[in-house]
Image (tube, rainbow, N blue to C red):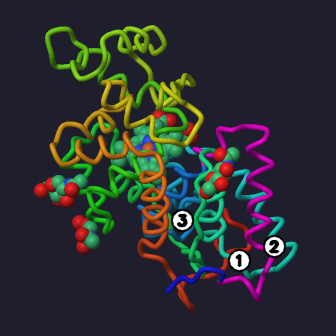
Amino acid sequence: DLQIGFYNTSCPTAESLVQQAVAAAFANNSGIAPGLIRMHFHDCFVRGCDASVLLDSTANNTAEKDAIPNNPSLRGFEVITAAKSAVEAACPQTVSCADILAFAARDSANLAGNITYQVPSGRRDGTVSLASEANAQIPSPLFNATQLINSFANKTLTADEMVTLSGAHSIGVAHCSSFTNRLYNFNSGSGIDPTLSPSYAALLRNTCPANSTRFTPITVSLDIITPSVLDNMYYTGVQLTLGLLTSDQALVTEANLSAAVKANAMNLTAWASKFAQAMVKMGQIEVLTGTQGEIRTNCSVVNS
Ligand code: HEM
Ligand SMILES: *[C@@H]1O[C@H](CO)[C@@H](O)[C@H](O)[C@H]1NC(C)=O
Ligand SMILES: *[C@@H]1O[C@H](CO)[C@@H](O)[C@H](O)[C@H]1NC(C)=O
Ligand SMILES: *[C@@H]1O[C@H](CO)[C@@H](O)[C@H](O)[C@H]1NC(C)=O
C-alpha cells in the first residue's frame, strides 16, 4: 500500500524538489496546473497510476500519449521531465515517475486553488502503454450522465466523486472539437444544443469553426466565470447552462448528480475538501507497489 512520506528516509527532498519545479513552470505559464492535474487523471484511468501516460511511442508501439484524448491536448510533460531531473540528481533511481506526477498534480491544485493535501506514495512505474487502452478508458466529452457514472464506477469512484472531480474543469481549456458537437448540426430545431446558453453558444460559434479537429489550435476556458482559479464556480456555471462540454452539462441531467452540483456550488470549503480526498482516492487506482514494475530512470522510456 501507499504511505504518506514514503521517501522521508530514501529521498527527503523529493516532494520539495517536485514542488519547486512545478512552481517555477507555473510562474511562467499558469496553464501548467490544469495540464498536470489532467495528466494525473489520464494516467490513473489507464492501467492505474503507473506513469504509463509518460511513455513515448516506439517503432513498434503507439503509446497512450498519442491516443485521441491525449494528443495534442495533454500538456506539462516538460515539467515532469524537469522535476525528474532534479529528483534523480538528489536521489538516483529512487523516486517513481508515477509518484512525481501525483505530487505535481497536488502542487498544481495548491498553486491554482490553495487546495492542500498529502499524497500517499510508493507507486512503481509500469512498462506498458497502449493508445488503444487510453482511447477506451478515458471518458469522452460526449458522454451522458449514465456513461460518466459507469466510467468512474469502473475505476472504483462513486458518482459523487465523479461530480467532485469534474470540478477540475474549473481551470484549463478545451479545444473546439471537444464541444463543436453542441454548436453545429445538433439534433434539435436550431442545430444548437438547447441545454447550452444561447448567448454563450453564439459566442462559441464565433470562436470555433464547424470543421475544427483536435489539432485546430483554438481553445476556450472550461470555466467561463473564474477560468484560472481552481474553485467551485464551475458548478455555478453548469447550473447557469454555461458548462462547456456535453459531459459538464450532463451533471445536471439526473436528480442526484444535480443535487451534488448544487451542494458543491454552495460551499467552496466543503467541495475543496472533497476534491482533495477524491484526488487521493483517484491516485490509488490500480497502483503498482513493492517489487512490481520499476523505478524508471527516464520518465518517457522503460528501463533497458
Ligand atoms: C467526468 C469526465 C471527464 C471528461 C469527459 C473530461 C473531458 C475533458 C476534455 C474533453 C477536456 C478538454 C481537452 C481539450 O479539448 O483540450 C478536458 C480538460 C481538462 N480536464 Fe477533464 N474530463 C473529465 C474529468 C476530469 C477529471 C476527473 C479531471 C481531474 C481531476 C479533469 C481535469 C481536466 C483539466 C484540468 C482540463 C484542462 C486541461 C488543460 O487546460 O490543459 N477532467 N477534460
Ligand atoms: C490558503 O488556505 C489556508 C487554509 O488552508 C489559509 O490559511 C490561507 O490564508 C489561504 N491562502 C490564500 C492565499 O488564500
Ligand atoms: C472495469 O471494466 C473492465 C472491462 O470491462 C472489467 O474487466 C473490470 O472488472 C471493471 N472494473 C470494475 C472495478 O468495475
Ligand atoms: C445517483 O444514482 C446513481 C444510479 O442510481 C447511483 O449510482 C449514484 O450513486 C447516485 N449519485 C449520487 C451523486 O449520489
**Disc on the earlier residue, 1 or 2:** 2
Kind of residue sitting beneath label 3: Ser
- Lateral position of residue 227 relative to residue 245, left or right: right
Density class for disc 3 (Cα within 10 Å; few <14, some 14-19, many ≥20) is many
What is the spatial separation of the Cα atoms under label 3 and label 2, in whole angstroms? 19 Å
Please identify the dominant SS of the magenta region.
helix
| Disc 1 target residue | 95
Kind of residue sitting beneath label 1: Val
| 32 is within the stretch colored magenta | yes
Density class for disc 1 (Cα within 10 Å; few <14, some 14-19, many ≥20) is many
Looking at the rendering, the stretch of residues picked out in magenta corresponds to 6-35
| 99 is within the stretch colored magenta | no
- Ligand 1 within 8 angstroms of badge 2 C-beta: no
**Percent position (x, y) of residue 103?**
64, 65
Q: Are marks 1 and 2 in contact (CB under 8 Å)?
A: yes
In the rendered image, the quadrant that contains the C terminus is: bottom right
Kind of residue sitting beneath label 2: Glu
282 w.r.t. 166: above or below: below
Which quadrant holds residue 252? top left
| Disc 3 target residue | 52
